Amino acid sequence: MANGFVNAKPRWWLRLDGAVLFVGSLLTFRLTHQHWWLYVVLLFVPDIFMLGYLRSTTVGAFFYNVGHSYLAPSLVVLYGWHFHHVAVLAIGIIWLGHVGWDRFFGYGLKYDSNFKHTHLGSLFKEGEDDPAA
């Protein structure tokens, strides 16, 4: 681990986990018998949690991580399952799919220091100035 980021094989495994979660959400969503356009329309809605970055990186990282960890969407899934609200269940499944999608593409949970500092590594491209470097 370098600079507090996961790297090498564990990073690859975490990204693969994200792909599995995304594909699992597609398969599970199918069981809800909801229209597929709903999945497409709602897939990127959880990115609304990035609005916290308008305040500061600390607030932004907090809200981003709330919206991009497994806890909140899992609670939505459990609520929908328990109370037999298929639409709520579908929304939670889509939300989990979004988290998987992001993890697969390397967008991990955020550090307070910078939007591009994630637990899966820095999102700075080679040649870009990383203030932490």
Image (cartoon, helix red, strand yellow):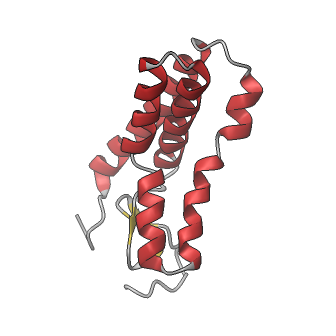
Q: Position of residue 93 (x, y in %)?
A: 52, 29
The correct choice, above or below, for 49 with respect to 85 in the image is below
Q: Is residue 27 visible?
A: yes
- Image quarter hosting the N terminus: bottom left
Q: In the picture, which quadrant includes the C terminus?
A: bottom left
Looking at this rendering, what residue extends furthest in the front direction? 83
Residue 117 at least partly seen: no
Query: Where residue 10 sits: x, y (%)?
Result: 28, 48
- Quarter-wise, where is residue 128 in the image? bottom right
Q: Is residue 4 left or right of residue 31?
A: left
Q: Position of residue 11 (x, y in %)?
A: 34, 51
State how many labels appear.
0
Q: Nearer the viewer, residue 68 or 6?
A: 68
- Identified at 58% across, 18% down, the residue is 86
Residue 127 screen position, x and y as percent: 54, 81
Above or below, 94 against 102 in this view is: above
As drawn, the residue found furthest toward the left would be: 1
Towards the viewer: 99 or 46: 46
Towards the viewer: 76 or 42:
76
For the point 49% across and 24% down, the residue is 80
The relative height of residue 92 versus residue 120 in the rendered view (above or below) is above
Q: Nearer the viewer, residue 21 or 125?
A: 21
Query: Left of 89 or right of it: where is 5?
Result: left
- Res. 41 image quadrant: top right
